[in-house]
Image (cartoon, rainbow, N blue to C red):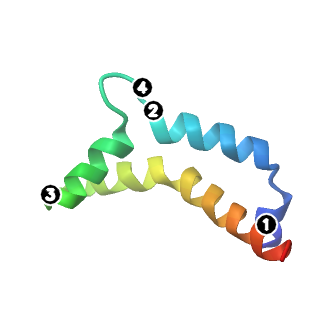
Amino acid sequence: MALLDKIPLMYLVIGAIFLGLAPFFPEPHLVEKTRMLINGTLTKPIDMFDMAWHAFLPILLIVKLVRIALMNN
């Protein structure tokens, strides 16, 4: 967690927006892969890797925000 604390919040926000929404057109991969997961069609390893790749920074941002909120209480 010490490594997460060293990452500036602004870098995580910018990275999460760009990686989470890339490609912007026609539809972000994260939205597409989440829809596939809900429908049960996320079966190919490349699709699973793609979802993990695009979700990594948004998840890291959420973890950091929760950690900041817990430290401030």
Residue 11, percent from left and from top: 74, 42
Q: Which residue lies at the image location 61% right of the left edge and 60% below the top edge?
A: 62
Residue 20, percent from left and from top: 49, 42
Pointer 3 with pointer 4, Cβ within 8 A = no
Q: Mark 2 — residue?
A: 22
Real-space Cα separation, disc 2 to disc 4, in angstroms: 5 Å
Q: Amino acid at mark 2?
A: Ala
Q: Which mark is residue 39?
A: 3
Pointer 2 with pointer 4, Cβ within 8 A = yes
Q: Which residue lies at the image location 76% right of the left edge and 68% below the top edge?
A: 69
Q: Which mark is residue 24?
A: 4
Decide which of 9, 48 is in the foreground and name it: 9
Real-space Cα separation, disc 3 to disc 4, in angstroms: 22 Å
Q: Mark 1 — residue?
A: 68
Which structural element holds mark 2?
loop
Which structural element holds mark 3?
helix
Give above or below for 10 relative to 5.
above
Real-space Cα separation, disc 1 to disc 3, in angstroms: 34 Å
Residue 7, percent from left and from top: 80, 54
Q: Amino acid at mark 3?
A: Asn
Q: Which mark is residue 31?
A: none
Q: Amino acid at mark 1?
A: Ile
Q: Is residue 43 visible?
A: no
Marked residue nearer the N-terminal end (3 or 4): 4
Q: Is residue 27 visible?
A: yes
Marked residue nearer the N-terminal end (2 or 1): 2
Q: Amino acid at mark 4?
A: Phe
